[in-house]
Every structure is written in C-alpha cells, then in structure tokens.
Image (cartoon, rainbow, N blue to C red):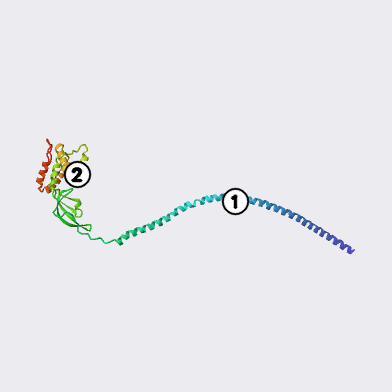
Amino acid sequence: MAAKKINRSVKRSAAPAKKASARKSAASSSAAKKAPAKKAAATRTAKAVAKKAPVKRTAAKKASVSKAPAKKATSAKAPAKKVPAKKVPAKKAAAPAKAPAKKAERAPEETKPPEPKKGPATSRYSVGDKVVHPQHGAATIAKRVKQSFDGQSREYYVLDISTESLTVMIPVDRVDSVVRSVISKTASKNVLASLKGEPQEAGANWSRWYKVLTEKMYSGDIFQVAEVVRDLSFSQQTKGISPALKRMLSKARMTLISELSFSLEVDEEEATNRLDRALPKVEGALVPIV
C-alpha cells in the first residue's frame, strides 16, 4: 500500500515536470519559428537601406560633380595672378645694361693719348697791317698779346678801329675768317662810281626795306655798304627818314669813308669830300646831305 502511495506521489510530481518540459519545448519551438521571421525582416530592412544608400551616394556624387566645375572656374583665375611675376626678368635685364656703359666711358680714359703741344697760332696778317672789320669798319692791327681764359692760354690780335675810340681783340687763329684786307685803289674808284646808280626806295613794306639795309650794312662787302649810303641819302633828301635810319646812314658813311681813306691813302676829310661829290644831287632837296 505504501508502495502504491509512493508511485502515485511520484507520478503526481512527474506530471508537472512533464508539463513544464512540454511548455519549454513549445516555447523553444515557437522561438525557433519566430527567429527566422525576425531574420527575414532584418534582411528586408537591410536590403531597403542598401537600395536607398546608392540613391544618396549618387546624389552626393552628382552634387560633388556639379560643384567640381565651379572650383575649376575659380582655379582658372590663378594664371591671371601669375602675370605680375613676369616683371622680375625685366629688372634683371636692366641691371647688366648699365655695366657696359660704364666700361665704355672708362676705356677712353685709359687709352687716351697725350695731347700734342700746340704751336704758336699763325695768320696771314701781322702787326701793323690795315684790315676791315665787318661791323666796325677799317682798323689797324696794333699788337699781338697772349691772354688766359678758363685756364687756357690763347694769342690775340688787338685792332684799333679808325672810326671809333675802340679796340677789338680777335684770336689769331680766327682773324683770317673775321676781317678782310682793304680794297685796292681801283676798287675804290668803282665804289664811288656805284653811288651814281639808281637808288632804291622803301615802298609800301618799310620793315622789309629796313631789314635789307641792315643785312647790307653788316655784310662786310664795301659795295653793299655804298648802296646803303646811296639809298638813305636819296630818301633823306626827298622824303626824310626816321631817327633809326639816320643813325644807320651815319654809320654807313663812316664805314665807307674809313676804308676809302686807307685805300686811297688820304685823310678822312679828303675821303669825305670825294664821297659827297660822287653822290647824286637832288633838285629841291628837303634836307642836304650830311
């Protein structure tokens, strides 16, 4: 009896255990069934995410691709900034250009030969000769002197002007090109004969006539000086002349008389008389010849 009671108690205790194990197995089987379902859902979501990711990547790529040309456009400005850098070679080229110029200046100093010593200046005229200065008339070479100007010594002829209390100094090496010899006696007679020619008047253009007379006066040609005396003497007797022309006439007469005196070997008074006799007389003259 006791054994039967024990078996019953054992069976009663085993029954709940079996039920519990049955429940566990059922739970495990349901969990096993649910696990594949969760895995399938997880894979589906992963695939959905994987499909969406390329869209974002392509969009990102498109955005990056579209932005890339903008960066290239800004990079195109870089060559414009490099242009000022070209000034550097110009400065380098200018520096060596100065060096040859300095060498060229120094070279003549090193190879410059010594200056030859100049001998005494020569001229076809000598002290005591009678000459004619183009602006002052007849003159006599009084002496030869040596003067120093700016550290340079030079020889000069001193001329005594016969018509004025004036002395003129001319370098000996230039006197031949400044003065001329006195005309001959035959040339003096031709000059006096030219005074009887037809005089020229001023006309309407007075300033032009005055300029021509001035050029003749300082030409150094005694025949042109005689024309000035003839024309102004005629105008003075017929119409009268201005104070400026009167001074020119007086100067021309003195220049002509001084050379006639040297040429004809007479004094100034006799030369003046010969000049006045050669000039034509005008009837009813307003002003007599001076």
Mark 1 falls on what kind of element? helix
How many other residues sit within 10 Å of disc 1, few (<14), some (14-19) or many (≥20)? few
Up-down relation of residue 263 to residue 17 (above or below): above
Furthest-front residue in this view? 186
* Residue 74 x, y percent position in the rendering: 51, 50
* Residue 284 x, y percent position in the rendering: 12, 35
Give the image quarter of residue 4: bottom right
Mark 2 falls on what kind of element? helix
Q: Is residue 258 visible?
A: no
User: Which residue carries the number 1 mark?
Assistant: 61
Q: Is residue 72 visible?
A: yes
Query: What's the mark number on residue 216?
Result: 2
Furthest-bottom residue in this view? 3
Position of the N terminus by quadrant:
bottom right
Give the mark nearer the N terminus: 2 vs 1.
1
Three-letter code, disc 2: Lys
Furthest-top residue in this view? 284
Residue 191 or residue 258, whichever sits in front: 191
Label 2 to label 1: alpha-carbon separation: 103 Å
Labels 2, 1: front one: 2
Give the image quarter of residue 232: top left
Q: Is residue 107 left or right of residue 241?
A: right
* Residue 185 x, y percent position in the rendering: 12, 47
Residue 139 or residue 74, whichever sits in front: 139
How many other residues sit within 10 Å of disc 2, few (<14), some (14-19) or many (≥20)? some
Q: Is residue 231 left or right of residue 64?
A: left
Query: What's the mark number on residue 47?
Result: none
Q: Identify which residue is drawn at 82% across, 59% down.
A: 18
Three-letter code, disc 1: Lys
